Image (tube, rainbow, N blue to C red):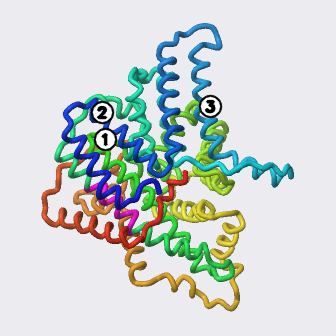
Amino acid sequence: MVFSTVLFISFFLPSVFILTAIIPSVRAKNAVLILASLLFYSYGEPIYVLLMLVSCLANWALALALDTGKEGSLPTRRNIVLTLALVLNLGMLGFFKYTGMLVQTADSVLGLNLKIGEISLPIGISFYTFQALSYVIDVYRKRISAARDPFVVMLYISFFPQLIAGPIVRYRHIEKQIAHREITLNGVACGLRRFIVGLSKKVIIADTLAVVVDGIYGSQSGQVDVYAAWLAAICYALQIYFDFSGYSDMAIGMAAMFGFQFQENFTYPYISRSMQEFWRRWHISLSTWFLEYLYIPLGGNRKGTTRTVINKFTVFLLCGLWHGAAWTFVVWGLIHGIFLMLEEILPVKKLPTWIGHFYTMFIVVTSFVIFRADSFSQALHLYAAMVGLKTDSTVRAGSLALSYLDPWTVTIFCIALIAMLPVTQILAPKAPFWEKLGVTNPSSTYSPAVVDTRIWSFALTLLLLVANLLILAAGGYHPFIYFRF
């Protein structure tokens, strides 16, 4: 873990916030945030903070070269600079993240018996590399101007709320905010509440469900029957949603406290009625990144059905690979890519609402099995168990599943099923039920609402914070799932 969570909440975050709040100059505020971000990152990985600094400075210089370059004979200077930026960023990501995977694959396929030392994966490298790439590419496309001040780029890439696990922020979305922003009471109150809600999603919901998932995945394959296998699959789908959306909520909330507005990263993906809709609601910053910087440049859907299918297949193959250096992630991405391709051909959108929802959730839940599995062998054992195969005949049906269903876990499980829905929208008057479920705009920017001054609302937020701190102090914490990506 990069920073002790209790230390972060009780000392680091309040100290940085108070310091930035009392400093009048935005430039000085930015300097404090840069120093705080470097301290935050170096707490767990001091050597890799140098790697991130190299990435910041290199991309600042390359973008500056693109902004001052002039078109000429091919290959143009700007094309050469862009190619250099792609090689640098993707080469750095590939070396640290995929060298071990490629060497291991070559060993198993070709029997080369290659030996390399262990290469530690810098935390958050997938996220900040994609941010750096989007910045350079946008300068190349002349959508933005390159920052003359290297510290502006450094703050954009290293800003600690989203440094470790996103969301992936575009420079053009916060360029003006870096230069001018205000810390308001309303923004601080709403941001703090969003942070506490995100922390609760992680500590109270995701970590409770993680006990079930880890226990069943860690059991002997013969002990896992159909009930345990499906319980683990459903719990993991809920765990990863509340774990990652919880981190996104924390990042968006902290950013609001400092005067920044980040775009939403999740908009209730588990109400989706197709895989296309799911990816408009799940990890929005990543799906829109691939859409803008890969899918559309490949031709998008402008060159016929066949090319569209190939483009989506390519995007999700790479999307799976982005998630981790293992072939299980690649297969997970391909599963999603295959169903997205099928939806280009089959009339999924014409299905009745409940059938579309069931179809989507079945694919999402079952595909997460291989995403969570440590190996193909483990995934196959879980899939076999899910259809009632390969269970030890001496194991009583449902015994493993029942061993994890204590009152606390069942309560949290039920809360998770409710919390994954847009409850406030469902309860709002004057709109049909399913219309309420679709009112959220996935591309919207988080804007703090008017502070809710009701006493019960403040009391509930304070109660959640106390509960989180008590759980954390007791040691009941698992690292965020996306820290390893």
Q: Which numbered disc flags the more N-terminal residue, 1 or 3?
A: 1
Residue 177 got which mark? Answer: 2
- How far apart are labels 1 and 3 at the CA level? 36 Å
Dot 3 surroundings within 10 Å: few (below 14), some, or many (20 or more)?
few
CB-based contact (under 8 Å), mark 1 and mark 3: no
The extreme right residue here reads 111
- Label 3 belongs to which residue? 303
Image coordinates of residue 422 in percent, x first then y, are: 34, 60
- How far apart are labels 3 and 2 at the CA level? 38 Å
Instruction: Using residue 308 as the reference point, say whether residue 476 is left or right of it.
Output: left
- The vertical placement of 422 against 289, above or below, is below
Res. 442 in view: no
Q: Nearer the viewer, residue 375 or 351?
A: 375
| Amino acid residing under circle 3 | Lys
Residue at x-position 34% and y-position 50% = 440
CB-based contact (under 8 Å), mark 2 and mark 1: yes
Residue at x-position 70% and y-position 89% = 393
- Label 1 belongs to which residue? 261
- The vertical placement of 221 against 192, above or below, is below
| Amino acid residing under circle 2 | Gln
Image coordinates of residue 25 in percent, x first then y, are: 22, 31
The extreme top residue here reads 72
Image coordinates of residue 221 in percent, x first then y, are: 68, 77
Instruction: Using residue 222 as the reference point, say whether residue 473 is left or right of it.
Output: left
Q: How many marks?
A: 3
Q: Range of the magenta residues?
A: 193-204
Residue at x-position 60% and y-position 53% = 336
- The vertical placement of 55 against 185, above or below, is above
Q: Look at discs 1 and 3 and give the one toward the viewer.
A: 1
Q: Quadrant of residue 108?
A: bottom right
Check if residue 200 falls in the magenta segment: yes
- How far apart are labels 2 and 1 at the CA level? 8 Å
